[in-house]
Amino acid sequence: MATGQKLMRAVRVFEFGGPEVLKLQANVAVPVPKDHQVLIKVHACGVNPVETYIRSGTYSRKPMLPYTPGTDVAGVIESVGDNVSAFKKGDRVFCSSTVSGGYAEFALVADHTVYTLPETLNFKQGAALGIPYFTACRALFHSARVRAGESVLVHGASGGVGLATCQIARAHGLKVLGTAGSEEGKKLVLQNGAHEVFDHKEVNYIDKIKKAVGDEGVDVVIEMLANVNLSNDLKLLSRGGRIIVVGCRGTIEINPRDTMAKETSIIGVSLFSSTKEELQQFAGILQTGMEKGWVKPVIGSEYPLEKVVQAHEDIIHSSGKTGKMILLL
């Protein structure tokens, strides 16, 4: 190893598999920013369900092994590469993507996915912005093309993406309905923009939603668990209604006829498909929300980097979790 090479702690994955393949190492080289890149000293990093799918090897995108997981970090700029003019050492920032992985003390990030973190938000909140809020923006504006006055059902609203969706939809003049699986979750959903909330553990909760939306149905469903809910969602839609699939953990059988009479559609979302221009558009929406105070990330469970295996177990197996899961460095 080159002399003078700076080392850091980082989580490394050498083989795909269960949470136990996440290995915390103390001798990982600190990356050096190249052209149009910055190096962030990480204070907090978000944990997202998609990172567990990638780690298990079942996701459509497989990184080259070994790799460091983690996408949305918040921290302070440590250094900048060539041709970076928007940021300097010491700036407080968050990002929507990383080059080198976020479960680490330092993360390399392309400068077009880095954004200023206002003083009104702490680093934990900054680490909860990336995937949840950008995904919510993509689902609402790019995929569903929502308009003020429409109704949206956030199916699974108490997690990171769900709460972000409620806040953004409410701020843009939509009627917001949400579901959650615990009393705490339901309360949180109402506090973060929903007009009404339903308990998706109740046997007849779909009937209650139908009653609440009336014969017209709901214009948009933002769906966090399509393998459980998709068939029910189709029966809730208005004429021309859209189901936006944000999360899915398996297969489901549906009757395509349920899409025909009302000419409804099922649309998938992948934040990774966003262009630079779309990311800038979403960032602009969120910057406005941070200034006006309606972007308020809710932090859920917090773990030190040493407990990353536990975090990956909990994000999949603990139902009724509320807010955004965070690793602290």
Image (cartoon, rainbow, N blue to C red):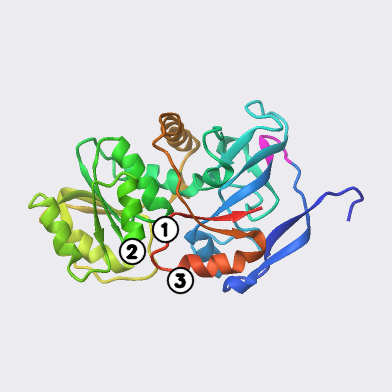
- Within 10 Å of the Cα at label 3, are there few (<14), some (14-19), or many (20+) other Cα atoms? few
Asked if residue 9 lies left or right of residue 198, the reply is: right
Please state the horizontal and vertical placement of residue 25, each as a whole percent of the image: 74, 63
Query: Which label belongs to residue 182?
Result: 2
Q: Amino acid at mark 2?
A: Ser
Q: Is residue 323 above or below residue 23?
A: above
Give the secondary structure at mark 1. Answer: loop
Q: Amino acid at mark 3?
A: His
Give the secondary structure at mark 2. Answer: loop
Task: Quote the CA–CA distance across marks 1 and 2.
Answer: 9 Å
Q: Nearer the viewer, mark 2 or mark 3?
A: 2
The tag earlier along the polypeptide, 1 or 3, is 3
**Camera-nearest residue between 57 and 204:** 204
| Residue drawn at 14 percent across, 63 percent down | 207
Is residue 100 inside the magenta stretch? no
| Residue drawn at 70 percent across, 64 percent down | 24
Please state the horizontal and vertical placement of residue 302, each as a whole percent of the image: 55, 57
Span highlighted in magenta in the image: 33-39
The tag earlier along the polypeptide, 1 or 2, is 2
Task: Quote the CA–CA distance across marks 2 and 3.
Answer: 15 Å
